[in-house]
Structures are given as C-alpha cells and as structure tokens.
Image: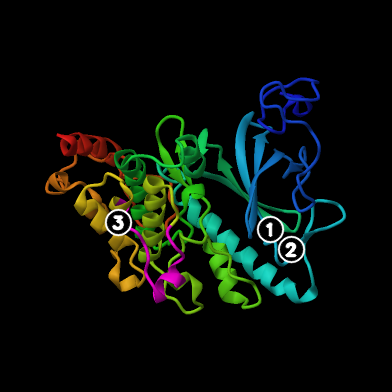
Amino acid sequence: MKPELLCMGCMVRKGTAAVCPQCGYFDRGPENPQQLPPRTILGGKYLIGRALGQGGFGITYLAWDLAENKKLAIKEYFPMQISTRSQDHLTVSPISAKSRQDLDYGLTKFVEEGKALSRFKDHPGVVSMLAFLNANGTAYIVMAYVEGRDLKEYLKQHDGKIPFDAALKILLLVMAALEDVHAAGIVHRDISPDNIYVEDNGGVKILDFGATRYALGEQSRSLSVVLKPGYAPEEQYRSRGKQGPWTDIYALGATFYRAITGRVPPESPDRLAEDDLMPPSTMGIEIPPNSEAALLKSLAVKAEHRFQTVAEFREAMLPKPVAQIAHRPVVPPPPPLSDYDDTAQALSPRSYLHLHSAFSLVLWRQ
C-alpha cells in the first residue's frame, strides 16, 4: 500500500481525502514539537503516525510496517526533562551539556528494557516486542499493535467502575503475566490502568515497563520523581526504597481498588501519617470478605505488611469457597514459551487462569 494513501490517525487507507472518513483524523503535523512529525520514515522501514501517548520518559507512536504491511506501535526514548528535538525535527539532543551524561545513561537502560521485553515476545500477557533500532540520536522499541483499549478507557466506557467479578477476571490475567515477569527477575514498576490493555478478543496485556524511568531517577537526583499518584507505593518515593514484587503488588491492588470503587487510593506517603483508605464494602461495593481483606493487605503502606509474591495475592483474592481448590487448574497449562534468549529463566505462561477464574466465579456465585 502506498504510504501517502494511509491515514496517520488509524493506518487505514483513506486515499486522497483530507480528513479520514474512518477516524476523522486530519494531517496537521505533530501535537507538539517534541514529537516526530507524522509520515516520518524510521529505519527505512517504519512509517510513523500520530502519537498514541507521551510520558515523562518516552513517546509511543502508531506506526506502519512498510515491508509487511501491518500496523505497529513504536516507543521512542525521549526523557522530557533533559531532551529536546533538534531543528531537523528528528534528532534527539540533550537540553544542556550537563544533561548529556544522564541522557546517555538512560539510553543504555532503555536498551536493557528492550532486551528484557524480548524475553516475552510470545507471552500471552505481555505486549510483544518485535524489533529494536537506534536512529535520530535515540532508540526505539517496535511493538505489536494491540486492538482494544487500556483499562483506564475501559473503565470510562463502563461508567467509571466495574463489578468485582469483572475486575477479577481481568486482573487474574495481569497477575499471571506479572508472576512470569517477576520469575525473570524483572519488576514492572508502573502498573496502573493506563498500562493494562484489554484486548477486543478478551485477552489482557501489560505494557510500558518503568525500568528506564527508575534507573534515570537513581542516576540523577536533579530529575524530579515522575510517579502516578495513588498507584505508587511509598518505597518508590524514596531514593533508597527497596523495590521488588511487593512494589508491583501495591500498584496492582491500587488498580483493582480503582476498578471496583471508581476511586484512586490516597497517595501512599500521605497514608504514612494517617491511613484513611476506605474499604470498598463501606462504599457499598459487593466484594467477598476474604477478597476485601486480601485487597487491603496488598495496599498496606509498608512493604513488609503486603503479600511478597503475586501467587500469594492471587490465592487470597479468590472468593473463599474457590480458594480452597485453587491449586487444581481446570485445564493444564500450555507448554513453556520458546524463543527466549539463553540468559532468560524458564517461564510458563498462565493464560489458563482466564478459564480457571471464570469457573471459580461460577462456583463462588453458587
């Protein structure tokens, strides 16, 4: 397909129309000068479209693979506090000579993040990384494009919150993915509704790991901490806070709380002085007592008071009649993933939990 005939808003053929009849996108250039201009060709192979999102340390674009004629997503390393776009509108440069060291250090960590993601190329619960390339003075992670919406948008489409059983069905799949990620020695560090993607086919994927952001924050005390209020545990606010699976467990608990109550928990540093977190049941939310107790434990302010593994959290979250038989899966797990690099630990996807959770909920309701 000729690139000039594609809409940069949805990558559907729009012909010569000024406004895309499919999505209404109009070619008006980037939303801000920090972003690559739509129709930029990256690496001689990828056509860059509109920006899907921009955070403190990167920009994600809609893209098109010119060789394979398919839609993609591409994440660009671009730490906003220390980067600028040069006059060619392509090259990423430090905002000052003093920022060069931090920019380069973050770039090496971004490369490491890409390598970590490559271990999960075929994992059912992690967005697939397809390629990695260096260009424009920075680096890019090429990822599969997932049809669906993030959990933040999903909740918005469901009047801001969903019932407990619907939330459990989604987040059991997130737990399965996180358990494998943790088994590989990786902490996500940025679990939240906008980093959980609900696929149109019913699957769930996690994306946008926070390793680069964390590493840069450790490297340079001049960079302000960029955290998501309500989802970040107190150890992420401290320069010497020890992070591990319990860090993701807090964020996952906060995401679960947001999904069923429609409210984001109070910020964790504020809860150190006075913990005013309201149990969901006090807001009229229907939730099994043992599940509510598990949810509140996952949101304990101090790390040592939380679950230390995702498996512990999952077992405690299942409604009580089911928790007693949770160790017996309804169907056997699929075979181990392949195509990992030699240094990766052996992982086994737990996508069968999707069926298991549905079966569990039927038993609970009975």
Q: Which mark is residue 43?
A: none
| Quadrant hosting residue 69 | top right
Q: Callout 3: few (<14), some (14-19), or many (20+) C-alpha neighbours within 10 Å?
A: many
Q: Can residue 311 be seen in this view?
A: no
Q: Where is residue 186 in the image (x, y as percent from the top left)?
A: 42, 61
Q: If you read the primary sequence from the N terminus, does the residue marked by circle 3 or circle 1 appear first?
A: 1
On the rendered structure, is 313 left or right of 326? right
In this picture, is 82 found above or below 180? below
Part of the protein shown in magenta: 265-280
| Quadrant hosting residue 266 | bottom left
Whether residues under marks 3 and 1 lie with C-beta atoms below 8 angstroms apart, the answer is: no
Asked which secondary structure carries label 3, the reply is: helix
Q: Is residue 161 visible?
A: yes
Residue drawn 73% across the image and 27% down it: 6
Is the C terminus in the top left, top right, bottom left or bottom right quadrant?
A: top left
Asked which secondary structure carries label 1, the reply is: loop
Q: Residue 295 carries which label?
A: 3
Give amino acid for label 3. Leu
Instruction: Check residue 269 for magenta coloring.
Output: yes
Instruction: Check residue 166 for magenta coloring.
Output: no
Q: If you read the primary sequence from the N terminus, does the residue marked by circle 2 or circle 3 appear first?
A: 2
Q: Residue 78 carries which label?
A: 1
Q: Where is residue 232 in the image (x, y as percent from the top left)?
A: 46, 63
Camera-side residue: 269 or 62?
269
Give amino acid for label 1. Phe
Q: Residue 83 carries which label?
A: 2
Whether residues under marks 1 and 2 lie with C-beta atoms below 8 angstroms apart, the answer is: yes
Camera-side residue: 197 or 63?
197
Question: In this rendering, which labeled residue sits more in front, label 3 or label 1?
Answer: 3
